[in-house]
Amino acid sequence: MVDREQKLLRIGEISAISQVSIKTIRYYEKLGLLCALKRTEGGFRLFSPEVIGRLNFIKRSQSLGLSLTEIGQILQIHDRGEIPCSEVRHTLQTKISEIDGRIKQLKTLKVQLQSLISETKPLQERKSGIICPIIQPEKVIKTIEEQQKSLLEIEG
């Protein structure tokens, strides 16, 4: 039993080895992504050295765009003694589809922005309520002018 306790690592040691902050390790523990095996009499968390590999998996998964929820689902499969590769494959395929959709949205946005820049004439003088016609198209400018005219009629 003493031999097993010597192999356990405190949270600070895990942090130093993994280069993950203590605060983040505690957060992952709160989410159920990590589990301290026990605590010392002083209340310090003690972890198995295997937690280092788990933290590396979490960090790599995040760098690939996986959310902590998705990572947790994969880890749950692993913790049941199963190999989670089919879940990982499915999750990554979903990410690819999301990226494709986002790329399509960004291309559409790019075209809209280019159009705004090339088609909008700069203001020659300041107009009340108008900050920049590139972002506030003529239709919006006319609406603002009509609203201001209505306000003047109400006040007058």
Image: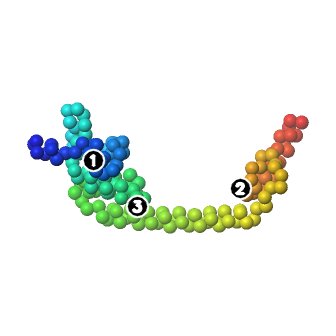
Image coordinates of residue 42 in percent, x first then y, are 23, 32
Q: Which mark is residue 64?
A: 3
Q: Which mark is residue 49?
A: none
Q: Residues within 10 Å of mark 1 (few under 14, many from 20)?
A: many
Q: Which residue is mark 1?
A: 14
Residue 17 visible? The answer is yes
Could you tell me which secondary element the residue under label 2 belongs to? loop
Q: Quadrant of residue 36?
A: top left
Q: CA distance from mark 1 to mark 2?
A: 50 Å
Q: Which residue is mark 2?
A: 135
Amino acid, disc 3: Leu
Could you tell me which secondary element the residue under label 1 belongs to? helix
Q: Nearer the viewer, residue 70 or 120?
A: 120
Mark 2 or mark 3: whose residue is earlier in sequence: 3
Mark 1 or mark 2: whose residue is earlier in sequence: 1
Q: CA distance from mark 2 to mark 3?
A: 34 Å
